[in-house]
Amino acid sequence: MSSPIVIYYYYDFTDTDYFCRELERRFRESGHTRPVKFINWNCYQGLPGRDGDLFIYDAIAMSALVSKGFLHQLPEIIDTGDMFSWTIDKSKVQKKTYGIPLMVCANTLFCRKEDDRNIRNIMQLHDSVAIPLRSMLMYYYLQALCNYQGESEKVSAVLTHLKNLMGEELLPDKSTLAEYDGIGRFNRGECKYLLGFTESLRLLEPGDYIVRFANFSDNEEDQMPLFMVDYASLGNHVQEEKLLDCLDLLEIMADPQFSYALCMQEGRLQYMLPPSKSVYPQLAASDPLYNWLYEMLLPEENGVFRYGPQFYEVFYNISDDMLKKLME
C-alpha cells in the first residue's frame, strides 16, 4: 500500500472539515488512490511534524518554516496566472517561491447602514467597537507601523485608541479570538461597530451593513494595505511518485473552481476572499459586495503579513510585552 500524503493544515482555515472533504473528493475524481492523512495544526503556536508532505498555514510563519527546513521551493508548473499577482510575489523567500495562495483575509470594519458615519480610519471611531485586541494586537501594530513608517508616537496612539474603544470590562482576557464574542455583542446591539474579518458577514443577523477594510491610522486612505494570506506549500523531503501526487493536490488547490467551492459552500456564501480574480464575478452574482472587494484587492501595492525567521521564538513574546505596556 502506498504511503499516505500527510497534510498539516491550519486549524482555523475556512471550514476545515469541508476543505478536507472537498480536496480529497477532487483528488479521487482525478484518478488518485493514494491515502491522504490530514493533521490539524495551529500554525501560530508551534511547528508541525517533520513527516509533513504538504503544509497549509498563515503567511506570517512562512519565513520561519523555510528557515527551519520544512518547506521546498515550488517548481514553476502550477498555473497561478489567475491569482492576484501580489499574493504570488509575496510568497517568495530569497527570490524563491514557496507557497500557493489559498485564501486572503482582511481586517474588516462593520457597522449597520443606519449607524454609518463614513468612517475612513480607526482614529475617526468614537463609538463602542468589538475588537479581538489580545489575539490581533501585533497585526494592528504592524499595520499602523507601515502606515506611519515607524513614527512610534502615532503608532502608540492607534493602539491606545483601540483599547479605549473596547471598554474596560473586556480587557484583556476576553479579547482573544478563542474567547471573543464580538459577533454576539454586535448582533445584540451592544456595540455599533465590529472589527473582524469578511467571513464575519455570514454570522451577522440579516440586515444592511457597511463593510470597509480597516485603516489603522488617521490617514484618509490606507497607505500600505496588508492582508493575511493562507498558503499551501510542499514539504522539504517529498520525492518520486508521492511528489507528483502532492503537485496534483496543489494544482487542485490552485484551481479557481476549488476556490469558488470553498467560498460558496452548498450554495451559501462564506464571504471569504479567494486569491483567484476570475472567481469574483461569480461570487458577485450572489452579492454585489464582491465587486467592491475585488477592486480593493487589485492594487499591486497590497502587501502580505509576513514575519521573519524568528516568528515562533519572538512574535508572541513581543505581543505580550506590548499588551502589558498598553494596559499600564
Image (cartoon, rainbow, N blue to C red):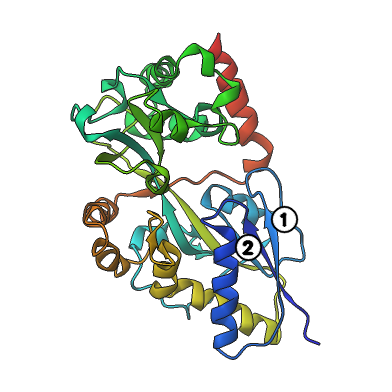
Q: Can you tell which mark lies on residue 48?
A: 1
Which quadrant would residue 116 be assigned to in this image? Answer: top left
Q: Residue 310: x and y, percent?
A: 64, 42
Image quadrant occupied by the N terminus: bottom right
Q: Is residue 6 left or right of residue 59?
A: right
The residue wearing badge 2 is: 55
Evaluate if marks 1 and 2 touch, with contact meaning CB atoms under 8 Å apart: yes
Residue lying at the far top of the rendered structure: 328
Please, what is the three-letter code of the amino acid marked with disc 2? Phe
Q: Residue at x 59, y 91 (%)?
A: 31
Q: Residue 55: x and y, percent?
A: 63, 63
Q: Is residue 317 left or right of residue 162?
A: right
Name the one closer to the observer, 117 or 48.
117
Q: Earlier in the sequence, mark 1 or mark 2?
A: 1
Image quadrant occupied by the C terminus: top right
Name the one closer to the observer, 18 or 56.
18
Q: Against 260, is 143 above or below?
A: above
Label 2 residue SS: strand
Q: Residues within 10 Å of mark 2 (few under 14, many from 20)?
A: many
